[in-house]
Amino acid sequence: MNTPLAQRIATLRAEIEKHNYQYYVLDNPLIPDAEFDKLFRELQQLEAQHPELATPYSPTLRVGGKPLDAFQPVRHAVPMLSIRTETDISDGGALAFDARVRRELGLGENDAPIEYACELKFDGLAINLRYERGVLVEAATRGDGETGEDVTQNVRTIHQIPLHLQGCAAPVLEVRGEVYMGRRDFERYNERQRAQSLPTLVNPRNGAAGSIRQLDPALAARRPLSFFAYGLGEVRGWTLPATHSAVLDALDKMGVPVSGERAVVRGAQGLVEFHRRIAAKRDRLPFDIDGVVYKVNSLALQEQLGFVTREPRWAVAHKFPAEEQMTVVRGIDIQVGRTGKLTPVAKLEPVFVGGTTVSNATLHNEDETRRKDVRVGDTVIVRRAGDVIPEVVGVVLGPSIHQGERKEAGRFDLFKWLHGKCPVCGSAIVREEGEADWRCTGGLFCPAQRMQSLLHFASRRAMDIEGLGYKLVEQLVERHIVGTPADLYDKHKLNLQTLAGLERMGEKSAQNLLDAIEHSKHPTLARFIYALGIRNVGEATAKDLARHFGKLENLMGADEARLQRVPDVGPVVAQSIVAFFREKHNVAVIKELLDEKRGGVRPKEHEGEAAEELPLAGKTFVLTGTLSMARDDAKAALEALGAKVAGSVSKKTDYVVAGAEAGSKLDKARELGVPVLDEQGLMELLKGNGVT
Ligand code: IVH
């Protein structure tokens, strides 16, 4: 069919696939995401309206189709072999392979060195992609090498895998390669799961294998997978080049992802160099590898060498030190992060893993520790890959340990473990509802959080102390000159003499800093509240609180119920505020800051009465439509009376002021039964409160 509609659909599919390739393979998007979404939605809509124009290779299928009951078996046209592994991880492994190949080929010492294609050994799941006339028709796992499983639906959700080959219409071209999960994708996925207290993936390899073997393709589509090609299966009607490296070049041109970390080298020395070069950059690769693979480059020589049982004689995997190892847990410590987050860390019998000796590994949080059921004395698997912090992957349950015998009583309980107190400063610890982490409430006081809280306190949108940057704060904290924000204002602690001893601090910059500190003494109340670094209290909330309470002491004395009367303050924020002021260390720091003889900080509060006693305190207004006075003036007048002026109408809105041509906000107000004032009503209200 070649109607304009069919043409539009074809164009959309081609365009979308082009952008998929640019985005996922080349990492070089040509259009903004929103544009892409528009094209995608148009195609989805056309396909829904015209099911007769559906194809099994439309990019709309990448979001995942119907769940399956089971995978269908697929018999491989050409068996999927495995590869011999060289267990000698030293240079010897490469030398042994070259010697074997030369012997098999009957080469003597004086014959020329052999040319090898070197590539990475990806750590994922082997997949066979079958393209017929350039179209992806089937994807299968390796299975036992003879028969695999049909995972086409799931593989289609991998955006990097082309649904069409560019410039290849061969009757059959099977591409073989590895489906894997990148480290960042793995970390991000697990972080999201952890934050929701959901199960995490053990490692990227299991992540890839588990997703591909997931019967519900929509779930598979949620897991970010990638692909690299490393060879061919059945080929019909496509002329093979002379070398393996040229095969990969050709696949690359067809739009199939091929790793750039590959090389053609000569002789054993070339193999050794490749192995060393990749070992040195292994940590910096964005995905896990467990070694490198050497292949005789000439396809003719490969044929001559042939196979032993299920392994080709022309290829070998040369391993690196493992990124996972077993060791014993000697203890569990709790570390306090810069934001007060408490992280359980396993103290380990030192073990060599991923190229270094590891004696600490994170357990992430309380729920993860419980789920993995890690206890002192257990044998565990530790993983260290890339720059990522080493982590405990799981417990190895030996014959003497059965899950059932490990009673509830032993379940890890972070609160009990710490007797409810921060191990660094002794402040109370809290775990808020819906949060995965316990936290120290000693914000301003806890040494572990000092750096962070001082930097926040001084930042531009908080107290705005110019010149108090990271390097300086670091020195001040390390030399015990400054511990809390109050110390910044203490002339005995911070003065020209103490500053002069610091790196990169001349007399002029020291004086400038002291001036900046002096200037910061009269912030607005909102800035001061924000500067305290109360969890969940950002700038906007700080402004709401300042407006509502007018005075710091009113805020400090408020309970959760009272706090929740502030617009936009819900139970979580209210709880954070109460926890912060309940901590006497924090209150002590605030007292010092405000003490005339010490800190001398005086936030600009409403004079005389508290804002809560202002006539419109606690009332929220929404202005809509055209008023004869400027919108900003109306807003300022209402705010002067203690009101808050919000942008949208909700149940918490007390009045909507509707000018001429008021639209949807007025409708919403009527719908919710919020009282509506017209302009005259507003004027009367202002006049009645002494504003003219
Ligand atoms: S070639 C006939 N090349 O390692 C040779 N395999 O036992 C077929 N693998 O699970 C394999 N990276 O998925 C080859 N660059 C690479 C590879 C690679 C990873 C995997 C493969 C299979 C295992 C081989």
Image (cartoon, rainbow, N blue to C red):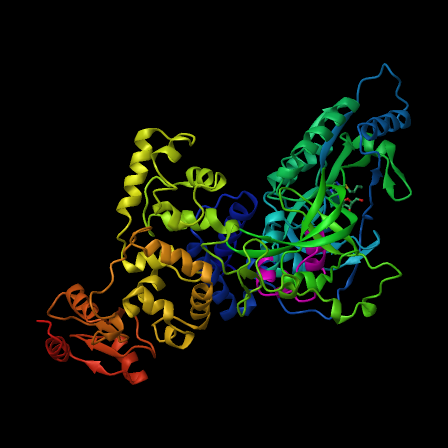
Residue at the limit of the structure toward the bottom, as seen here: 673
In the displayed structure, 609 sits above or below 8; it is: below
Is residue 416 rendered to the left or right of residue 690? Answer: right
Q: Residue at x 26, y 46 (%)?
A: 519
The image quadrant that residue 274 belongs to is top right
Q: Position of residue 112 (x, y in %)?
A: 80, 17
Q: Position of residue 571 (x, y in %)?
A: 45, 73
In the displayed structure, 269 sits above or below 385; it is: above
Give the magenta-colored segment's residue range. Answer: 191-220
Q: Residue at x 60, y 50 (%)?
A: 162
Work out whether residue 292 can be spotted.
Answer: yes
The image quadrant that residue 296 belongs to is top right
**Nearest the eye: 363 or 577:** 577
**Quadrant, the C terminus:** bottom left
- Give the prevailing secondary structure in the magenta stretch: helix
**Nearest the eye: 33 or 636:** 636
Q: Position of residue 552 (x, y in %)?
A: 32, 64
In the displayed structure, 121 sits above or below 100; it is: below
The image quadrant that residue 200 belongs to is bottom right
Q: Is residue 459 magenta?
A: no
Q: Position of residue 532 (x, y in %)?
A: 39, 56
**Nearest the eye: 346 or 229:** 346
**Nearest the eye: 39 or 101:** 101
Q: Is residue 196 magenta?
A: yes
In the displayed structure, 293 sits above or below 66; it is: above
